[in-house]
Amino acid sequence: MKLLFVIISKEDVDQVISGLNKEGFRATKIASSGGFLKKKNVTLMIGVQDDQMNAVIDIVKGICHERQTVEVNMPIFFPNGMNEASFSGYPETVEVGGAIIFAVDVSHYEKI
Ligand code: 2BA
């Protein structure tokens, strides 16, 4: 059995969960946020049999928006003695959209 952690944007979550449920997969939705951009995102925990993992990945692939390159104002690092007034942030391009998927082996599963 595998436990998938699927990190997606909030805009895609309803569609992904209904796509999963339609195919008989269950998911737990956890509110999360990215450590880099500090924007809210969603992490889904999905437990599946090993041979079902690719079907779940295909559902996510079919729904999550394509990756886009966007320009963002990065969080500011303040060197010693400097504060917000010293900097106004700096633009950087990052890729957003799509999904990040981790799969881990489950050593035990039980429903009580
Ligand atoms: P964030 O950490 O807010 O990252 C948002 C996007 O910023 C990333 O998109 C990536 O394009 C860029 N980015 C992140 N860290 C960077 C860095 N150190 N330098 C340059 N650009 C950077 P994604 O890669 O699609 O990640 C989307 C979200 O998925 C992340 O939000 C984070 O919440 C999660 N994530 C991605 N990789 C992860 C990992 N290895 N472990 C845990 N969570 C991860």
Image (cartoon, rainbow, N blue to C red):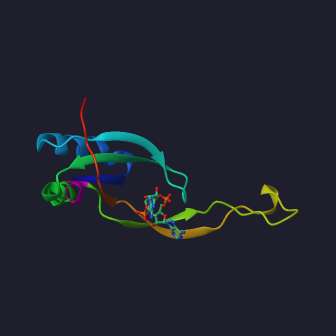
Residue occupying the far right of the picture: 81
- In magenta, the rendered stretch is 59-63
Judged left or right of residue 41, residue 16 is left
* Rendered residue at 28%/40% (across/down): 14
**Residue 60 % position (x, y):** 23, 55
Measured as percent of width and height from the top left, residue 71 is found at 51, 66
Q: Nearer the viewer, residue 73 or 21?
A: 21
Quadrant of res 81: bottom right
Q: Residue at x 36, y 59 (%)?
A: 97
Name the residue nearer the viewer: 3 or 107.
107
Residue at figure coordinates x 34%, y 65% from the top left:
67
| 54 displayed left or right of 9 | left
Q: Main secondary structure of the magenta part?
A: helix
User: Which of these two is toward me, 62 or 35?
Assistant: 35
Q: Is residue 71 magenta?
A: no
Q: Nearer the viewer, residue 74 or 41?
A: 41
Q: Is residue 68 visible?
A: yes
Is 14 drawn above or below residue 9 in the view shown? above
Residue at the front extreme, as displayed: 108
